[in-house]
Amino acid sequence: MSHRPFPGRRSVLRGSLAASAALTLPTALGSAPAFALSGRPEAGWGVQTGDVTCDSGLVWVRSDRPARMIVETSATESFRNVRRWHGPLLGADTDFTGTTRLRGLPSGEQIHYRVLLADPDDPRRTGEPVTGTFRTASARRRDGIRFLWSGDLAGQGWGINPDFGGYTIYNAMGALDPDFFLCSGDNIYADGPITSSVALPDGSTWRNITTQEKSKVAETLAEFRGNFRYNLLDDNLKRFNAQVPSIIQWDDHEVTNNWYPGEILGDARYTEKSVDVLASRARQAFSEYFPISTLRRPDGRVYRTVRHGPLLDVFVLDMRTYRNANSTDDQTTDAQGILGAEQLKWLKGELSRSRAVWKVIASDMPLGLVVPDTGDGKPNIEAVAQGDPGAPLGRELQIAELLRFIKHRRITGTVWLTADVHHTSAQHYQPSRAAFTDFERFWEFVSGPLNAGAFPASALDNTFGPERVFVKAPTASNVSPAGGYQFFGEVDIDGHSGELTVRLREQDGTVLFTQVLQPGRVGQ
């Protein structure tokens, strides 16, 4: 494919690492005070960029004390001829995090940036700058696009293991020089405490970095914030954040396992039983720790469209906030479904208006894979498919409505990307195999986990006629990262032919499966 070079990345990353070196292991273990009381502001949690378009992007940072956020950008890593952006005052109300929106950027260009944290009482006193870089989306089709996706980080008690090298999957992803990374949810496991060690089946021991906030399930705002900070103790992730923009969505573990609005928990680990209260606190921490373009809106919504030039629009779904209660999912009418009526209306409108060659539907849950929810001892369903291979029921009714809409509006280039099930696979959906036939063929690709327990492949539901063309999954449940089965996916869109190539990759970057799709088609 035609893909732009990435100039000067290594020296940029050296600067980022030097600036983040103040975050030492004793601090990670919770033996140091949370904030220093003297000196200059420091940004030991690194920098991130998010929701980058042809002419804009968001830059994120966290300070160790009150500070004014300042961002400087340049076309060169020497930072000659800088442009300065004055960001927010970082304080306790946002856990000393802040995001600055950059507008009017040149399209298809490498942007070098550095974040300075200034003393609010003396702007001349600034901490060591933290540097990063990103590419804006190109307005020229011929430049091509490469991006990655995955999900599920620090789940099932498998946290940052220094003996294992930490979250090493981010090194393999960064080596591919992607334009952005789509995280398909479960950025944290707020319901998954991290202990200092876990015995492995072979008799060896998995050792975790631990923190106070990760010693129990998250209930307070401080504990949710601590879950997001935990992942930023990993140097691999911080390096990756400094070089690759993100598009972030959420799923259940940002709050608690398999949650839905209005749920009252029966889990004895929780003193706060209202999921709505927990979700409100989790959403605030989520909005503080990721650069997301819509979270500062009055409705604070996660679903959004991120446009990446003429080749690609990414439609980021929220299958949590608007869903109905988990149930046997076999009702014959279901107006609310898993998206809610308003989000479904939005998605239809956005797909209809899109002129991008490819329309990636970023779905935090799979469509035809059966994902059960047996937390309360009942045979409830967590995702869409419920295992009945016949006509659509329950949440499938809403998906059937969407697939019918795509067919009859002749919307081309739709591809579904997801994570959640902790294995990697490729499903091809076709009407000739399905109980419901009023749709065009499409692909759904699954990846993950990034660093979490791996699980056997989920059962398929034939309502939409999926055929599992490829799968790699363990036969045992909750296989640790040391046992393998950690995955990410890659998407390459060629700027000349418009072909879209999906590669499913292992933790070290090894390609497991490749599928090439042709542009301009309603079905594939």
Image (tube, rainbow, N blue to C red):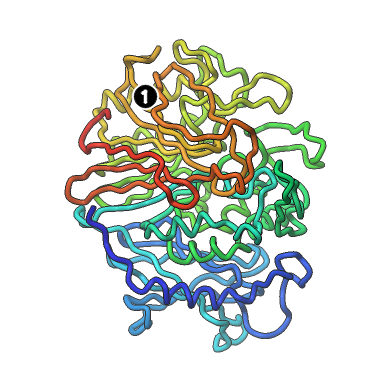
Asked if residue 70 shows in the view, the reply is no
> Where in the figure is residue 26, as x and y percent of width and height?
74, 70
Q: Residue at the location (53% across, 45% down)?
A: 486
The picture places residue 188, in percent across and down from the top left corner, at 62, 49
Residue most extreme to the front: 202
Question: Does residue 345 lie above or below 196 as drawn?
Answer: above
Image quadrant in which you'd find residue 179:
bottom left
Most foreground residue, 200 or 178: 200
Residue kind at label 1, given as amino acid type: Tyr
Give the residue displayed 34% in from the left and 84% down from the top. Answer: 80
**Residue with the mark numbered 1:** 429
Report whether residue 384 is seen.
Answer: yes
In the current view of this chain or complex, which residue is farthest to the left? 496
Whole-percent x, y for residue 478 in the image: 65, 38
Count of marks placed on residues: 1
Foreground residue, 288 or 167? 167
Quadrant containing the C terminus in the rendered view: top left
Left or right side of 323 for 84: left
Where is residue 46 drawn, in percent x and y?
55, 68
Q: Residue at x 32, y 21 (%)?
A: 439
> In the image, what residue occupies the spot 30% across and 53% down?
145
- Using residue 69 as the reference point, say whether residue 226 is left or right of it: right
* Residue 452 relative to residue 211: left or right: left
| Disc 1 element | strand
**Relative to 31, does residue 499 appear above or below in the rendering?**
above
What crowding class fits label 1: few (fewer than 14 Cα within 10 Å), some (14-19), or many (20 or more)?
many
Q: Nearer the viewer, residue 294 or 241?
A: 241
